[in-house]
Image (cartoon, rainbow, N blue to C red):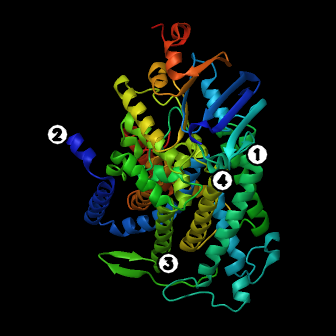
Amino acid sequence: MNLANRINTIPAYFKILLGFIITLSIAFVLGVQDLYVHGMLIGSLFALGAIGITLLYAIVNFAHVAHGDFMTLGAFLAFPLVASVVDVEYVSYADDFAFTGLFPALGLDQVGLGPFTFGFTILLAIPISMFILAIIAIGLEKFVYRKLRLRGSSDVMIAMASFGVAILLRGAISTIFGTQLRSYDRISKPFLKIGWGIDVPPDLLFLGIVALTLCLLTHYILQYTKIGKSMRATSDNPDLAMVTGININKVIMNTWIIAAGLAACAGILIAVGSAQMVPQMGWKLLIPIFAAVVLGGVGNAYGAFIGALIIGVAMEVSTEYINPAYKLGVAFTIMLLVLTIKPRGLFGGKD
Amino acid sequence: MGNSNKILEVNNVFSGYGEIEILHGVSIDVYENEIVTIIGPNGCGKSTLMKTIFGLIRPTSGSIEFMINNIMTPIHNYDTENLIKIGLSYVPQSDNVFPSLSIRENLEMGAFIKQEGMDESIESMYELFPILKDKKDDPANQLSGGQRQMLAFARAMMLKPKLIILDEPSAGLAPNLVTSVFDTIKTIHEAGVSILMVEQNAKAALERSNRGYVLATGENKATDTGNKLLNNKEIASLYLGGK
């Protein structure tokens, strides 16, 4: 048995675990373990977006360019729930809507829960935002994407239509909330010292755990539920799925609901984690997220998850050595390097 | 009752893709517990007929009736889910398993519209095809060509249909596997299901069929028992490779 064969017989999860341990050890040796851990946590937030994009590609067969703006919209949908705009610092027509957020107005505890900058109200806002964005996604599918499919538009045309939807959503967000920097109400909190030279903001740790929980939930849905199995079957072979009585339109709807829900949650978590939100935030994140999707193998949800962690770590660790402005370039360089060796991504995708 | 009950009647059906008409008035019958094979040259409309019966293509005229509660009922407006509910099942010619799903999950997809009794159905398929049980957690893309056909048939059997439609079950298989596929067809037939198939491998199929139809240029050319068609010199020379 030669070496290549031996490597091929190692199970994928073992390789991933090994890769994780080796790279973490290298990070310790180089003294960048702090950035590595940050990267893992940020990567897990990217994963929420990447899984949605890759599932949509696997089942609806097009690159959903509006996914970044779905994330932005998710973050801004939570804004009127948890945030209060009281001080008008910049003169802008958009600040005419100065208001107190719904939950603070109801007298619910707003900020500084335990070691965190935010209050428990954000946890209430997440499912609400996920729900609203899922409904918006269903509307877009029904009135835009399905119509295009029925008229026989190519996948590229539908991807371009989603580009249009992206611009539309961003424009709507800018018009309603203004274009200036905003954030949910928050108070500063000290970093958490984990030891071994790793300090993380407690927020980020919490956000990472929420993101990982949602990824696990998605894994459970895909592997063990009727909805998930019908999604995988449709991704595998839509014609056969149809003759076994699976309703493809229902499967597509379920995919939109899952992808939009994950995107809304990702948007809120990123807005909390970075303590700021602008209408362009999701659009900019689309680049590393697409890199994660391609890196893991387009259409492969598990690949997207691992790809997102790799991209997150690569981007954060790179800031130790080069100007942080080149973070996105690093994400793309990693993706290109891997693709030259494995053209279908690390874990193989869908043709 | 026995073999005399008609379960499918296709009467003077015209059908095709868009503007292109492929079937110009085809009629066939299938009775309970029969194996019926349709043979004919390439492009004669065999697969189109199968797709039309299973509602994947709507006929432009003619009738398709199926036995529901002992009454022949027109089914040409039924959607896939309803066709499966009344006891029809279809196995496409190629790509007829879900490659990344496990064997067990493939079988589950066969009973997608009705989850009750899933475990019992799966167990009875494992009894019919023990090899599937041995590999139940492997993805279907690790099966050999013959085993894939086995899985595809088992998937189609999950809801205990009255009639299974097979579109060229031996297509694309190595010659030594063809016999094993026909053995598999015999196995599912003995489990109590009627079979309507189209087949390129006309001789092997007709030998195992109660009756056969010869289709050419979208029209019925001949019909008889399997053996009589095999022994008919004119048909043999035209459609069975001249032997």
> Label 1 lies in what chain?
A
Q: Amino acid at mark 2?
A: Met
**Residue B217 in view here:** yes
Q: Which residue is mark 2?
A: A1
The foreground one among B225 and A9 is B225
Q: Secondary structure at mark 3?
A: helix
Mark 4–mark 2 contact, CB under 8 Å? no
- Look at mark 4 in the image and give the residue it sits on: A66
Question: Which label number is shown at residue B10?
Answer: none
Q: Residue at x 43, y 60 (%)?
A: A309
Say which residue appears at 68% left-offset and 41% top-offset. B66
Q: Which mark is residue A203?
A: 3
The reply to whether residue A181 is in sight is no
Q: Mark 2 falls on what kind of element?
A: loop
**Left or right relative to B231: residue A182:** right
Looking at the picture, how far across and down is residue A104, in whole percent? 70, 87
Distance between mark 2 and mark 1 Cα atoms: 54 Å
Q: Amino acid at mark 1?
A: Lys
Q: Earlier in the sequence, mark 4 or mark 2?
A: 2
Q: In the displayed image of the protein, which residue is found farthest to the left?
A: A1
* Mark 1, residue position: A147
